[in-house]
């Protein structure tokens, strides 16, 4: 028996509504939020850097952004930052500092202390915005940057991406970035090696894996 037009439309609508309730056709990530499973961790790579063409970017490691109240994980990473800075300077890497608008060089934490003559720029999460960071790097012949910092999901993510979009190779030590939560560090790590145009420019490593 052929259904009447009105009944057919009701049946079609019921079918559509049933499809919307299935996990594969949810209206947005909000409906699927509780079903999300984290992907496996990306691999880390041992890297060897050329001191003549590599810069270490020390991003916002100051008391306003790296403190026990907001980011205890940043405080925990400071000994590793100190180790990396010492090794980078011993090899002759170019070291560049960045700060947020609320910080000055006097606010940089002792473990990440500057040495006279090292440049510093002040900006928001993307340290290329309204600064001469790109010129500073290119004038030194820099082709690769290592990014460490107090806010994985802020300055590290956006400055690493900004570097890649400007043609720099980027090395990100995952134990040299921090956030308020493990989740923020996790999604930053995933995005850095999966986002379009970033995956071919960014290498994940650890501080102890940089030669």
Image (cartoon, rainbow, N blue to C red):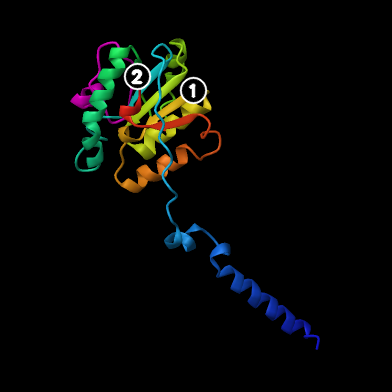
Q: Residue at x 48, y 24 (%)?
A: 169
* Residue 123 image offset from top left, x and y in percent: 38, 28
- Dividing the picture into quarters, in which one does residue 102 lie? top left
Q: Nearer the viewer, residue 126 or 171?
A: 171
Q: Nearer the viewer, residue 198 or 99?
A: 198
Label whose residue precedes the other's in the sequence (1 or 2): 2
* Residue 186 image offset from top left, x and y in percent: 38, 44
Picture layout, residue 51 above or below residue 82 = above
How far apart in space, not on screen, are marks 1 and 2 (Cα)?
15 Å
| Callout in the foreground (1, 2) | 1
- Indicate yes or no whether the magenta region holds residue 201: no
* Residue 70 image offset from top left, x and y in percent: 24, 43
The answer to whether residue 167 is visible is: yes
Picture layout, residue 86 above or below residue 15 = above
Which residue is the extreme one toward the bottom? 1
- Indicate yes or no whether the magenta region holds residue 99: yes
Q: Which residues are magenta?
A: 96-120
Q: Secondary structure at mark 2?
A: strand
Picture layout, residue 197 above or below residue 28 = above
To which residue does mark 1 refer? Answer: 168
Q: Residue at x 27, y 28 (%)?
A: 103
Which residue is the extreme one toward the right? 2
* Residue 40 image offset from top left, x and y in percent: 43, 48
Picture layout, residue 147 above or below residue 194 = above
- Dividing the picture into quarters, in which one does residue 108 lie? top left
Number of callouts: 2
To which residue does mark 2 refer? Answer: 96
Give the side of residue 165 with respect to residue 47, left or right: right
């Amino acid at each position: 028996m052929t259904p009447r037009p009105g009944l057919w439309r009701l049946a079609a609508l019921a079918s559509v509504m049933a499809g919307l309730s299935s996990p594969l056709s949810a209206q947005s990530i909000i409906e699927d939020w509780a079903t999300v499973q984290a992907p496996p961790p990306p691999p880390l790579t041992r890297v060897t850097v050329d001191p003549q063409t590599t810069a270490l970017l020390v991003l916002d490691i100051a008391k306003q952004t790296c403190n026990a109240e907001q980011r205890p994980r940043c405080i925990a990473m400071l000994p590793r930052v100190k180790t990396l800075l010492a090794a980078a300077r011993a090899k002759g890497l170019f070291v560049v500092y960045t700060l947020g608008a609320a910080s000055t060089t006097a606010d940089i934490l002792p473990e990440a202390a500057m040495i006279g003559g090292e440049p510093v720029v002040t900006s928001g999460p993307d340290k290329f915005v309204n600064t001469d960071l790109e010129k500073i790097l290119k004038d030194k012949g820099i082709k690769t940057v290592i990014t460490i910092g107090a806010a994985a999901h802020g300055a590290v993510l956006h400055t690493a991406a900004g570097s890649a979009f400007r043609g720099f190779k980027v090395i990100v030590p995952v134990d040299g970035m921090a956030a308020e939560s493990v989740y923020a560090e996790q999604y930053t790590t995933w995005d850095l090696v999966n986002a379009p145009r970033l995956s071919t420019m960014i290498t994940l490593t650890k501080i102890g894996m940089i030669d």
